[in-house]
Amino acid sequence: MLCSCQSQPAGWKRLLQRSGQAGPVQPGQLALITLGEAAGCEIVTRPHTQLAALARRTGGAAKPSGAGGGDLGVAFTIGNDATQKLREDIRASGLTLLSLGAPAPGLRLENA
């Protein structure tokens, strides 16, 4: 579920303007930004916001990893085409891309 940027608090709009990003916002990301503002610390950094905007353009999503604050962000896409496009966009944006793989297949339904 995505919600419109026009319904977000002023602090979020300022963050989007400062980072040069626009478009729909993930509710979880908005919650982390609001929490960070209330705590007086930056949980969702400008690179996290940039990664989230790039992921949204491919139909995906992104979030800070762990407690946030600028260490790493993770992005999720569906399908090889969207993943490849996001990788290209990340490289073109100047963000650092770490390609990590899983040693086993992901979630799947098995018959009992």
Image (tube, rainbow, N blue to C red):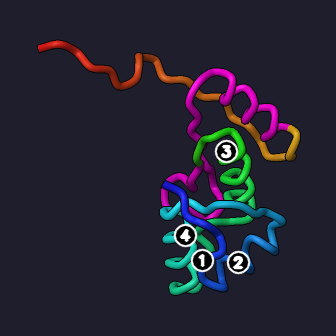
Tell me residue 39's x, y (percent).
Answer: 51, 84
Q: Which mark is residue 8?
A: 1
The local crowd at label 3, few if under 14, some if 14 to 19, many if 20 or more residues have their Cα within 10 Å, is many
Measured in 3D between alpha carbons, the distance from the residue under mark 3 to the one under mark 2, in whole angstroms, is 19 Å
**Circles 4 and 1: CB atoms closer than 8 Å:** yes
Tell me residue 76's x, y (percent).
Answer: 56, 39
Q: Residue at x 86, y 46 (%)?
A: 94
Q: Earlier in the sequence, mark 1 or mark 3?
A: 1
The local crowd at label 2, few if under 14, some if 14 to 19, many if 20 or more residues have their Cα within 10 Å, is some
Left or right of 32: which side holds 110?
A: left
- Where residue 92 sits, quadrant-wise, is top right
Q: Residue at x 58, y 83 (%)?
A: 37
The local crowd at label 1, few if under 14, some if 14 to 19, many if 20 or more residues have their Cα within 10 Å, is some
Tell us which disc is closer to us: 1 or 3: 1
Q: Secondary structure at mark 1?
A: loop
Q: Quadrant of the C terminus?
A: top left
Amino acid type at circle 1 is Gln
Q: Which residue is mark 3?
A: 55
Q: Earlier in the sequence, mark 4 or mark 2?
A: 2
Q: Secondary structure at mark 2?
A: helix
Amino acid type at circle 3 is Ala
Q: Earlier in the sequence, mark 3 or mark 2?
A: 2
Q: Which residue is at the front of the view, 35 or 66?
A: 35
Q: Which mark is residue 30?
A: 4
Whether residue 78 is situated above or below residue 64 in the rendered picture: above
Residue range (magenta): 62-91
Measured in 3D between alpha carbons, the distance from the residue under mark 1 to the one under mark 3, in whole angstroms, is 19 Å
**Circles 2 and 1: CB atoms closer than 8 Å:** yes
Q: Earlier in the sequence, mark 4 or mark 1?
A: 1
**Circles 1 and 3: CB atoms closer than 8 Å:** no
